[in-house]
Amino acid sequence: MNRFEGAGFREAKLRYLDGDYQIITSGSFVICAMTGANIPLDELRYWSVARQEPYADCAASLEADKRAGILPNQKRA
């Protein structure tokens, strides 16, 4: 394999599904919607299907849900 083959170190474009994702454009990582951190695809565990965005960890996912106002018992502004 040469350097022009494979995903390389570039951002992947994904379609986030329930419990899985579909690769639209190959790459080795995605960028967290909350923190801006690079998330290697093999470490991606948190995302929003509704907002189609990935998160680096549980805390980032929770913060995104808070900002969206979709948590139970959360008053919407």
Image (cartoon, rainbow, N blue to C red):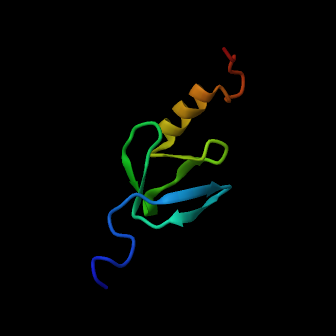
Where does the C terminus fall, quadrant-wise? top right
Where does the N terminus fall, quadrant-wise? bottom left
Where 14 sits versus 59, above or below? Answer: below
Q: Residue sitting at 32 percent across and 64 percent down? A: 9
Q: Quadrant of residue 69?
A: top right
Where 6 sits versus 35, above or below? Answer: below
Q: Residue sitting at 54 percent across and 49 percent down? A: 46
Q: Residue sitting at 36 percent across and 61 percent down? A: 10
Q: Residue sitting at 39 percent across and 70 percent down? A: 7
Q: Residue extending furthest left?
A: 3
Residue 3 as seen in the image, left or right of residue 48: left
Image coords of residue 50 (percent x, y): 67, 43
Where 69 sits versus 33, above or below? Answer: above
Image coords of residue 76 (percent x, y): 69, 18
Total number of numbered discs in the rendering: 0
Image coords of residue 3 (percent x, y): 27, 77
Residue 29 as seen in the image, left or right of residue 73: left
Q: Quadrant of residue 18?
A: bottom right
Q: Residue extending furthest right?
A: 73
Where 8 sits versus 58, above or below? Answer: below
Image coords of residue 12 (percent x, y): 45, 60
Residue 56 as seen in the image, left or right of residue 23: left
Q: Residue extending furthest bottom?
A: 1
Q: 65 or 73: nearer the eye? A: 65
Q: Residue extending furthest front?
A: 4
